[in-house]
Each structure stands twice: as C-alpha cells, then as structure tokens.
Image (cartoon, helix red, strand yellow):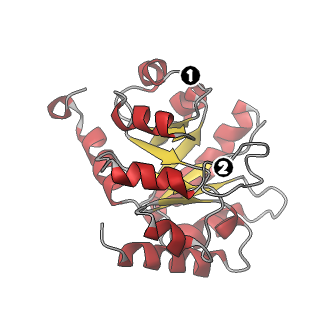
Amino acid sequence: MPKHLLSDRAVSLRARLDRARLYLCTGARERQGDLPEFLDAVLGNGVDIVQLRQKGMEARREIEYLSVFREACDRHGALLAVNDRADVACAARPDVLHLGQNDLPVSVARRIVGEDMLIGRSTHSEEEASAAAVEPEVDYFAAGPVWPTPTKPGRAAPGPKLLDYVTSHRVSRPWFAIGGIDLTNLDQVLDRGARRVVVVRALTEASDPGAAAAELARRLREVQP
C-alpha cells in the first residue's frame, strides 16, 4: 500500500522498525518459569523487538503467552512479533508477523492480518534476500544463518558472505543479520555492514540477560547507520 494511504498505526510501526537494532527470539521459558522477569530484564536493557518462537505450541497456549509478552512490550515500548502463524497474529494482534520461506505467501498473510501489522521475511540465500528486499508487503527481512545454530538444526549457514551481498546492494529496507550472533562475534557482523541483529542464545542462555542485552544494544548503537 502507498505510504500516504497507511494508517497512523502503520506509519508509527514502520518508524519504530527503522529505529530498531536488537531483535530477540525466545521461547516461553517454561523450564525456567521466569518469563515476566526475563522479558523485563531484556526489554528494559535495549531489546527493540521480541518474538515468541516455540515450535509445536498449540495456538491457544501461544496466545496466552503472547498476552504476557504484550504487557512487557507495552511497559518498555518494544515491538512484539509472532512467528510463522498468521492465524495467531490475527487473534493476538502483535506488531509484527515473521514469515519463513515455507510459510504462507506474504500477500495471503497480508490479507489475513491487514495493513496495521509489520511483516518480516527469513532469507537464507542471495536470491531470497534480493527478493525480500523488493517484495511488496514485506517490511524487513533477516539474512542468515551467519553461523550454524542449534535453533535451526540441519540448515546450512550461508555465512558472512550473505551479509556482504546484502550490504553491497545498499538495500533501503531494514534488514537483520541472524544466526549464532553473540557478544563474542558481533564485531565480525558489524564489519560486514550489518547494523541490526537477531539473537537467541546470546540472551536466552546468558547468566545475566539484562547485562548482555545492554552490552549488545550499546555496541549496535555506537556504530554509524
């Protein structure tokens, strides 16, 4: 949809996406039993977008957990993302629906969730990144995995060269590097031109998630756009 026809909410969400640098994917922390505390720690220390990603969860249970995420995001001014499922996004009304390559076509998902929601896209090759950079209805994309990660077992990592490719094409649409990124290798990602990252274990397995989030956010914001 042309920008001049977007609602105030849609315009606001896209402006917030433009400012976002640190994106977290996390499960519901059922084993730890500390979901509200964990979310407050990371969102209060620089996470801009948080996605509930827990494969195999039934829709009703996911919507229940998303209400906890929603309250935390509202407290801290962060964006909430749903993974894969347009039906859950339609029910829970997050800020973002993130789609993989094997999920619903973006045009179909857009018809389900409407214009007042951001749609993101996973990409794992130069061809997929090129398509996502210009695909109508896509608001941002993630490029990776930069390094192999147990959250995507069996998926080959295209590696840092995919970041080189996206950077060299001067993509105007927001994009995030993803896959095995943490404080020990963040500089390698930044050196390749990425300015936004998606993390998982860097925060979900950190001994002090709040401190780790604060350091990641600080280093991302120190780099020139």
Is 193 left, or right, of 82 in this rendering? left
Q: Nearer the viewer, residue 160 or 204?
A: 160
The residue at 39%/25% (across/down) is: 114
Is 146 left, or right, of 75 in this rendering? right
From this view, report whether residue 100 is shown above or below residue 185. above
The number of numbered discs placed on residues in the rendered structure image is 2
From this view, report whether residue 118 is shown above or below residue 205. above
Give the quadrant of the N terminus: top left
- Label 1 SS: loop
Q: Nearer the viewer, residue 67 or 203?
A: 203
Residue 97 appearing in the image: no
- Label 1 is placed on what type of residue? Leu
Looking at the image, the residue that sits furthest to the right is 31
* Mark 2 crowdedness (10 Å alpha carbons): few <14, some 14-19, many ≥20: some
* Mark 1 crowdedness (10 Å alpha carbons): few <14, some 14-19, many ≥20: some
Q: Which mark is residue 104?
A: 1
- Label 2 SS: loop
Picture coordinates of residue 151 (x, y %)? 74, 51
Picture coordinates of residue 34 (x, y %)? 74, 65
Instruction: Please report whichever mark, 2 or 1, sits nearer to the chain's N-terminal start.
Output: 1
- Label 2 is placed on what type of residue? Ala
From this view, report whether residue 125 is shown above or below residue 46. above
